[in-house]
Structure formats: C-alpha cells, structure tokens
Image (tube, rainbow, N blue to C red):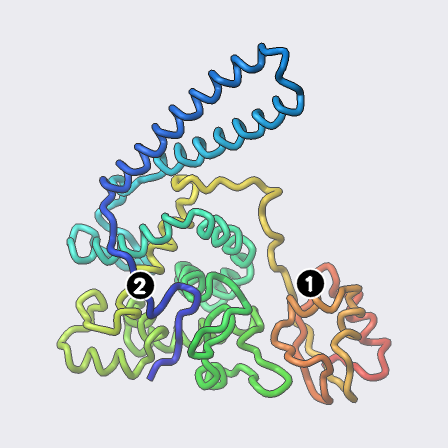
Amino acid sequence: MTTMQHSGSGVGKKAPPPSSGAGRRTVLTSRFLLWTVTLGVILLFFVGLSSDAQVTNKKGGSLEKRIAGLEQEVAILRAMVDFDHTDTLSETLLLCDKRIPLARDDIRERFEREYFQLLENRGLMTILVKRYLKYAGLINGEIQKMALPSDLIYLVVAESYLNPRAVSSASAAGLWQFIKETGRREGLRIDDSVDERYNVKRSTRAALGHLKKLYNEFDDWFVAMAAYNAGRGRLREAIDNQGTRDFLDLYLPEETERYIFRIMAVKEIISNREKYGIKLYEKELYRPVMISEVTIGVVREVPVLTLARYMDFSYKAFRDLNLHLRKYRLPKGTYSINVPYEKRDLFLKRVKGSAYVTLQ
C-alpha cells in the first residue's frame, strides 16, 4: 500500500532518454561559441555606429541594452559549460553514509537520469537551493534532536521541492507529502478545521518519526526511504520474494527505483552548488523560517484574522506560517500556532489580554 507520493517531479510522465556528458558538452560549447561570435559582430557594429553622429542617444541606449542582454546570455552559457562536471563525479557517492557505486554502469545510468534532468533546469535548482537555505535551520534542528542522518533533508527536497502547499494527484500533502492515513498514524491532527500535514514543524517531526520506524524495521536507510515512498508493505513483499535486501538490486515500481537516485542527485547539486554555477548573494536569499509553537485554547469561535492581528500580521502573512488552519474561523478547541520568534512576546501578551483565547 502506497503511503507516500512524490509531487511536482513529473511522476507518470515519460522521461526523456538520458543524454551523454560528452554530447551535452558539445552542444553547450557550440552554443557558447556561436553566441560569442554573434556578440563580437554586434560589438563591432555598435562601435561603428557609436562614431556616427546620426545615432541618437535613444538608439544607442537601445543597442546598449541589447548588447548587455547578449553578454548575459554568453555568461550563462559559459557558466553552463564550466559547471558540466560529469567527469569529476566520484566513482562513489554517499547518502546517509551508504555508498552509491557509480562504477556500476546500471547504477551510473540511473543516477545520471535524475542528475542531468535537474541540471538542465538551472532556474529550478536555484530556487531549490534558496528554499533549502530557507528551511534548513528548522528541518536540520529536528533531525538533530532525533539523532538521525543529516542527509534526510534532501528527501524532503525531492518529495515536494520544499513547497509546503504541495498536493499530489494522490492527495499527498505538505512538505513531506503525507497521505491522510499515514499522517494520522504518525500523530498529525487532520480534521475539518486543521490539517497538520501543512504544518511545517509538526509534519517534519512526524515524517522523521515515520522514517525512524522504517529504518528500525529494515535496518537500511535506502530501503527505509524507498518504503517511505512506496509503503512498507510493498518493500517487505519485494524483499521476501526477491532474495535480496539491497535496494540497488530490488525490482520495484519505477518511481520508487528512481527515488533514491533523485535524492542523491539533489544532495550532489545542493551540497556542491557553487561547483554547478549556483552562486547566491546574501541579499538574494529567502528569509529563514524561524518559528516557535504556541498552544492556545479557543473559548468560543474566533476569526483567524484576530490571531493574525495579535502578531500585527496580515491574514496572508499569518496563513503562510499556519497553513494547517483550514478555515477563516476557528471553532472552540485547542490549536497549535506557529509564531515567528520576533513576534512571540507580542503574541503572548495579546493572547493573555483576550477574553476568547487562552494559553494552554
């Protein structure tokens, strides 16, 4: 029984055949040379025009913008050529301290399928690196508390592209792509008013707890992660009938077979991002998610907007941190609220002064 589904990665679509590193380099180099020659011709043309008194400032400005655009194109192509590091990949990559032996042709092909697909979309990888840095503090903090492998953060990147609002075609939801059954089994509250699959902090704890149980059962992180994707029952059946416990040699649904390699490719690129031409300045980064949990009791129905105002937030800003609250009004009950560190004291003060909301 499938307990997790991947979203946002084209599951079920026919993937393009893997390209060879040499062929890709040839294409990139050819494009780079073509653009370089084109830019040179335009520069010569512009130099000639710049001495012509008939060229107005307006026209010159237009040409300058065009040249600047072409220079940017060439810079991007140069970077793409520079960060084609296929030949520098180690023969062995590590994920959760387990080896992925790229010296095996079949293993290298499976890895490169995911690796090249990610590299071909540099814009996506830039966004993923920025989201990774946005959520790394929160997720790594929970991983460390549970003494689990730090590489598990790359699993959640592969699962949802770190989109806390992600929903798959199988209705798996949130950063960690829980279906309702598994989420409830792992202690998440899922009802008409609240769906904690969308609570980034609580869903992270639940997912890590689930992964820890799977590891304790299978004693292998690759198999545990595969079971997270396909379901423990399917992995148990495969092991019992195929005579091996080695994930790399198990015959599984294609999505699950690709799963570990996608996570490994994500790790390789994000952890070596500058090698792949992804260089970010501090001002370009997204603000890190730094939140604390506050448990409140609602004595009678309260608008969510009221809670937002307790933080001096707009409704949207509040909901972005509290996606698990599914309605405009909270009925009587107990709720977990994510509060930015810098707003905690203000929120607590205003809750204490409320007639309808209490601290638990």
* Mark 2 vs mark 1, CA separation in Å: 34 Å
Secondary element type, mark 2:
helix
Determine contact: label 2, label 1, CB under 8 Å. Answer: no
Percent of width and height locating residue 102: 21, 52
Instruction: Name the residue that disc number 1 marks.
Output: 340
Q: Quadrant of residue 88?
A: top left
Q: Quick check: 224 above or below 261?
A: below
Number of residues whose C-alpha sits closer than 10 Å to that of mark 2, classed few (under 14), some (14–19) or many (20 or more):
many
Quadrant position of the N terminus in the picture: bottom left
Residue at image location 49% in from the left, 75% down from the top:
173
At 73% from the left and 59% from the top, the residue drawn is 342
Q: Residues within 10 Å of mark 1 (few under 14, many from 20)?
A: some
Q: Residue at x 35, y 76 (%)?
A: 214
Point out the tag, 2 or 1, that comes first from the N-terminus. 2
Reading the image, the residue beneath label 2 is 260
Front-most of residues 15 and 3: 15
Q: Which residue ends up furthest to the left in the rendered image?
A: 243
Q: Quadrant of residue 325?
A: bottom right
- Amino acid type at circle 2 is Ile
Q: Position of residue 126 (x, y in %)?
A: 48, 48
In the displayed structure image, the side of residue 269 where residue 222 appears, left or right = left
Q: Is residue 270 above or below residue 326?
A: above
Q: Quadrant of the C terminus?
A: bottom right
Q: With 182 as the anchor, is 53 left or right in this view? A: right
- Secondary-structure class at tag 1: strand
Q: Position of residue 277 (x, y in %)?
A: 42, 39
Report whether 181 appears left or right of 342.
Answer: left
Residue 12 in view (yes/no): yes
The tag on residue 296 is none
Point out residue 112 in the picture as x, y percentages from the top left corner. Answer: 27, 52
Q: Amino acid at mark 1?
A: Pro
| Residue 52: quadrant of the picture | top right
